[in-house]
Image (cartoon, rainbow, N blue to C red):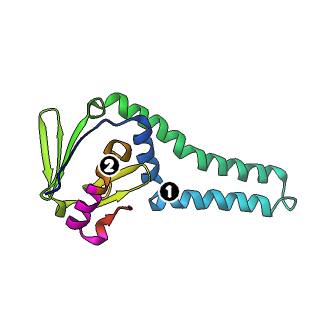
Amino acid sequence: MDKIELDVKMTFKDMYRFNLYHAYHTSQGILSIMLAVMLVLISVLSWGDVNVTYNVLYLLAAVVILFYVPLNLRSKVKRQLNQSEVYQKPIHYSFDENGITTSFADQSVTMPWKQLYKIVSTKHLVLLYGGRIRANVIPRDQLGDDYTTLFELAKAQVDSYRFKMKR
């Protein structure tokens, strides 16, 4: 019987990575990147054919589109970390064949594996989605050597179309 227990303390870097991942893995994030690339291409391809002011405006718009989201997310994450009590103290996670138990302060909730919307791993994070938007974030560096155990446990419990973890 595999069981993993760990305490997770969210850092600015981890929360920022999650927000960037979430922002750029939606249709809106993909469209914003495509729009910025199109604006750069229009500016480059029309250079000399139109007034230089338009080319500069196209490039400026591309820069604003590319940098607005990351800069806006930085301030949002700082505000979240400072204002929310949940991020001030560690959250305790327990994984076993019955599900995922999350404990904070004197509250504890167990979610069966079948209710998990999806589980995703990135280079730095493991994301446990309880719904399309809401996710519990576990930094891989805090998970340490238990990542392989979690991978095997989740693979056995979660349907393949909801299992998006990489070895």
For residue 121, side relative to residue 158 (left or right): right
Chain part drawn in magenta:
149-161
Question: Which residue is identified by label 2?
Answer: 145
**Mark 1 Cα-neighbour bin, 10 Å: few <14, some 14–19, many ≥20:** some
Q: Secondary structure at mark 1?
A: helix
State the residue at coordinates (48%, 58%).
28
Taking depth in this image into account, of 58 and 37 the one nearest to the observer is 37
Taking depth in this image into account, of 161 and 44 the one nearest to the observer is 161
Image spot of residue 50 (x, y percent): 84, 59
Image spot of residue 16 (x, y percent): 44, 41
Question: Which sits earlier in the primary sequence, circle 1 or circle 2?
Answer: 1
State the residue at coordinates (17%, 64%).
114
Residue 29 — which label? 1
Give the total number of marks visible in the rendering: 2
State which mark lies toward you, 1 or 2. 2
Q: Secondary structure at mark 2?
A: loop
In space, the residues marked 1 and 2 are separated at their CA atoms by 33 Å
Q: Is residue 134 visible?
A: no
